[in-house]
Each structure stands twice: as C-alpha cells, then as structure tokens.
Image (cartoon, grey):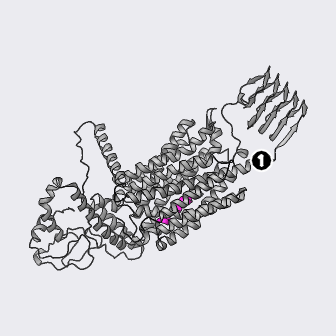
Amino acid sequence: DGYRNTNQVSDDYRYQDGNYDAPNDGYYRGGDEPAQEEDAQSDVTEGHDEDDEVYEGEYQGIPHPDDIKEKKKKRAPAVDDEYRDRADLMAERMEDEEQLAHQYENIIEECGHGRFQWILFFVLGLALMADGVEVFVVGFVLPSAEKDMCLSSSNKGMLGLIVYLGMMVGAVLLGGLADKLGRRQCLIISLAINAAFAFLSSFVQGYGFFLFCRLISGLGIGGTLPIVFAYFSEFLSREKRGEHLSWLCMFWMIGGIYASAMAWSIIPHYGWGFSMGTKYHFHSWRVFVLVCALPCIASLVALKFMPESPRFLLEIGKHDEAWMILKQVHDTNMRAKGEPERVFTVSYIKTPKQVDEFIEIQSSTGTWYQRWLVRITTTLKQVWDNVLYCLTAQYRMNTLMLAVVWFTMALSYYGLIVWFPDMIRYFQDEAYESRVKIFDEEEVSHFTFNFTLENQIHRNGEYRNDKFIGMKFKEVRFEDSLFEDCYFEDVRSSETFFENCTIISTLFYNTDLYEHKFINCRLINTTFMEEKEGCHIDFEEDNDFLIYLVSFLGSLSVLPGNIISALLMDKIGRIKMIGGSMLISAVCCFFLFFGNSESAMIGWQCLFCGASIAAWNALDVITVELYPTDKRATAFGILNGLCKFGAILGNSIFSSFVGITKVVPILLASSALVGGGLLALRLPETREQVLM
C-alpha cells in the first residue's frame, strides 16, 4: 500500500472532497500538477514552498491524492487478503509487475546512462574478472603442485574438476539466494567466500585440504556470474542493455589474460617463496595463487560503496529505499553531465503486491539456533520454489531450450579448451621422443657422472666403480644393464626407470630413486640410505612456457569477437547472434583436422575462441531478459550450473582421446554446436522488451 508520512491524517481529511481527477495508473508524471484548492495547501508539506516549487534534493515521495483515495477504498478488503484465493493475489501481483516494468524503464531513461553505470561497470567487472581467473588457476599450478604434493594422475584429474563442481553448486545456490536476499549482499558473500578460501589454499600443504579449499573457493566464485549480470542489467535502459552487458563480458577475457601473465611472470621464479623446516614449503606457485585473489578482493572492497539494485528493492516492497537509490543514480549522472540543477521528478513508484513475506520470529521464541534454522529452511524453500517456477508452463519451454543451448555450448567450448593444450603437449612429447639417444652395450668404469642425463635409453651396458653425484636423470631408461660397486649421491630423477637390471654392491644415498623405479631388477648387497622425502621441483625444466602462451593468446583472441558482439547485439538481436556464432564455431571445428603441429593447433584455437565468444555474450544477455526480476538470478544460476556440468563432462571426455584420435572430439564438438545453434533460433527475441 505504499507508505504514510506524519501528515497522513490531515492529508486524508484535505483530499476527501475528491476534486482531483488525475488517472491512477501507477505511473509517475513529470509535468505540471493540476492546481489544488487553497484549503488543500499546507505549509508543513516537506519539499514545497508557498508557490509549490520543488526544492532540489528534497525528498518528494509524498503520497499522491489519488493514491490516498485508493488506499481508503482498499482499506477494508486489504484486511481480507489472507482469505482471498492465492491465484487472485498472484494475478494482481503480475499486473502490478507489468505496470512497474514499464514505469521502471521510464525512470531509468530519466536517470540517464553516465558516471554511476560506469563506476558499477568496473566494480562488477572485477568480480567477473575473478571468475575468469578461477578457471585458469588450477591448470597453471598443476605442473608445479603435482610434484610439490606428489599427486597421482587421478589426483590431478580431480583437482582439475573440483573447481567446476564448486562453481556448479555455487551458481545454483547463490543465484537463488540473490533473488531473496538481494544482489549486492549475495555478491559480497560470494566474493568473500572465494577470497577467503583462495587465500587459505595458497598456504595449506596437504592435498586433501588444498582440494577442499579450491572446492569452496569455486563455490563462492560460482555465484558471481548470475548475480553480476542480474545486478548490472537492472541499472540499464532497454537501448543500452545488450551493448553494455556485452562490454561487461570483456572482463572474463581480461581475467584469463591476467592469470596467464601472472603465471608466466611468477611461477618460473622458484626463489619467490620460503621454507620452514623440512615439512613446510611455500613455493612460487603459491604466490601465484595469492596474486590471483587480488581482483576478487578489489571488487569486494568496492562493492561496499555501491547500492542495492532498486529493481530488487521494489520487488520486495521497499519503495523508499529504491527511490533514494534511483535519485542517487540520477543526481550522479546529471552532475557528471554538467546539469546539477535538473531535478529527479519521480514522486511515486509502483510496488508489486507482496504475497509471500517472512514472518519475523520473536527473540523469545525458542533458542537462537532454532530461530536461525527456521530462517534458513524458509529461505531455502523459497529458493526451491523459484527453481520450480522456472519449469512452470509459462517458462518451461524457454528454460528447456536455453538449458540445451547452454549445455551444448559448454560441452564443446570447455572440452576443446582443455583438448587444445593437451594436444600441444602430445605434439611436444612426440617431438621429444623422436630426439631420444640410444646407447647399446656401453662399458663405463671409474667414472664420475656429475651432469644431467636427458632423453636417453641405455641398453646392455656395464657400469663398474662409477659415481653418480649431484646429478639429474630426466627421461632416462636403463635396460638389461649391470651396476657393480657404484655410488649414487644427491641424485634427482624424472621419468627415470631401471628395467631388468642387475645391481650389485651399490649404495644409494640421499636420492629419489625409489623402489617403484626398479622394474624386474636384481638387487644384491645394495643399500638405500636417507632417501629424499616428498617430491622435488626443477622449474627450469618442468614448467612449459608454451602452455602459458597458448592460454594468453586464447584469451586475447576473443577481443575482436567481444567488440563485434557488443556493437551488433542491439542491431541484429540476441537470437541471430547465438545461432550465427555457434554455427561459425562448428565450421571452425572441422579445420582442426588439419591441425598437425603446435603452431596450427594454436591458430585454430584462437579462431575457435574468437568465433564462439559472441554466442556466450548473447546467451548471458537473453538469459537475463527472459525471466522476471524475482526469478532472474535463480534462472541464470540454474543454467550456469548446467553449463559447469557440461564443462566437467567436456573435460573428461575430450582429454581421454588425446593421442588416440582427433575424430571423436571434433565431431562431438561440431555436432553439439550445430544442434545448439539451430535450437537457439527458436528462442524468443528480447531486444525490444522491457525488463520484467
């Protein structure tokens, strides 16, 4: 019913004669108001003088005379709302929401697009940048972390997928909460969770705890994408929405570039760390994890100075708070344009009828944890009701079609993004193996090896009274060889094995030549003393700079696609953008059959990423516009969670075919893109509709 000020009693008396006949349609009117009778004027009305001139900056949210009469008419039936049919209440609320949607569009147009939106653009851009960084972090630290934590192949695979699992849960949960608790509050919670656990993960030593921290960190960052787009869209007018949401997507690209550049400049510097005893090691890859949390922390701090979405506040009936925020937006933009004298002419904004509201639990009711349990379960039930609402008859078809498009896009995109680096490594390994040196039947005695042996195979050799001191074995195999009276000290090895060898009267002191590296060997009078503990890193040899370069170029290659999609989003529409981009990306997939070298694979990756980014941007925009305000973040969270599930499947399926065949990944990706692109053409176009 709006709100009542201290003069409400006298206002009711003054306007009871009913001489004011302006239409009551819920819209604000910026023109001159009809003259009122002299006895209807009051010197105590805030924001007016004797000439009824509006003071700049004064609160003008005084109830309209017609609204007062309407309140008096509705006062009796309002008491009986609890006895009315729920369908009638929902129909009334939907009618109110439709009126609010058109009125809010007019208000945003009056506020203009200026300094306020650009400040919010950069604040939310940092949050989106943190999401982009999170996708790349684990992939960059794996080559170092696998040796720092002695990870097996299965452990590495789990670490790569755990972030997507957390993001999938976070998108659904935090996106749903944003429709109940507010965009700003839930975004702060999301970023705080990510920052705290990302910071903690850089210090933990054990694999299990590190895995847990990355899971919760991913859960936090998973909520940012649905909240950021819902939040920013509610400050944009219809003419600006498609373009500026597309510009916002560029920060995901900037996050990938930032992560690649930081990995390239930090991880290879092994000395950028410290050790505490023999158990605790803080290597440079942990410094990289810390640096990657900076965009998240910066966005978290900046959000403290930004307001809640006024559209969300109107949905939950907080008229005055929404009015003050919209006035702040208007005044900020007008001052930036050099027109500070322009007055915000809105006096009343339609608020939808509140059907489901929280019942505040008194402090004397139960214990504190019982009260919190009731609040949490009530909120989660409302989130679940919102999820089910997205599958009702009104939205079912759109939700299912969008789900298929999101899933097919994620399956092909994230699958190929992992497949490209794996294929490049495969080509590198093939080239490396082609340069292997083979030594047959060599005999070496009384010789000291104090240098690196790399990419060699020694067969049927004999080594007597030899010393291997302070050296490295990398990709070395000894087959059917004899070691007698030899001495190994301070030896480090990588992918080195002894097969069918005979080792007699030999001492191994402070080495990492463990038992599993001796395959079908006979050990006679051989001693192992003070074996090296843990796994040891050699950054100069074990970190592949080309992988950083590939990720950097892949992120940079989407820049042209981002610019084109932003400029054309409102001209050709969302549907044509999605369908066209996905079909062009499918064509790019077929060129991968000609990628038989590292350089060719990098080139096709850049082409694919540049072509597919327009579809991602248009999907973000149309998902925001197809759902009403009180369901927008929930629907976005569901679809984005499904996207992360597609990413998990894509990573698992595509990586399993590396080195086996290129046909299956290419055909799977291209067919998914074609199917999703054709289905997207059946979605409704949203560029001309207001934000419901």
- Of residues 438 and 233, the one nearer the viewer is 438
Give me the residue at 89% from left, 32% from top.
Answer: 447
Quarter of the rendering containing residue 336: bottom left
Is residue 128 rendered magenta in the image?
no
How far across and down, in percent of the image, does residue 304 sit?
41, 55
Numbered range of the magenta stretch = 245-254
Left or right placement of residue 628 versus residue 639 in this view: left
How far across and down, in percent of the image, does residue 558 sit?
58, 63
Image position of 351 with respect to 649: above or below: below
Q: Which residue is mark 1?
A: 432
How far across and down, in percent of the image, does residue 455 sit?
79, 42
Left or right placement of residue 352 versus residue 442 in this view: left
Image position of 111 with respect to 320: above or below: below
- Of residues 363 and 583, the one nearer the viewer is 583
* Type of amino acid at the residue the image marks with label 1: Tyr
Give me the residue at 85% from left, 28% from top.
Answer: 482
Left or right placement of residue 504 versus residue 404 in this view: right
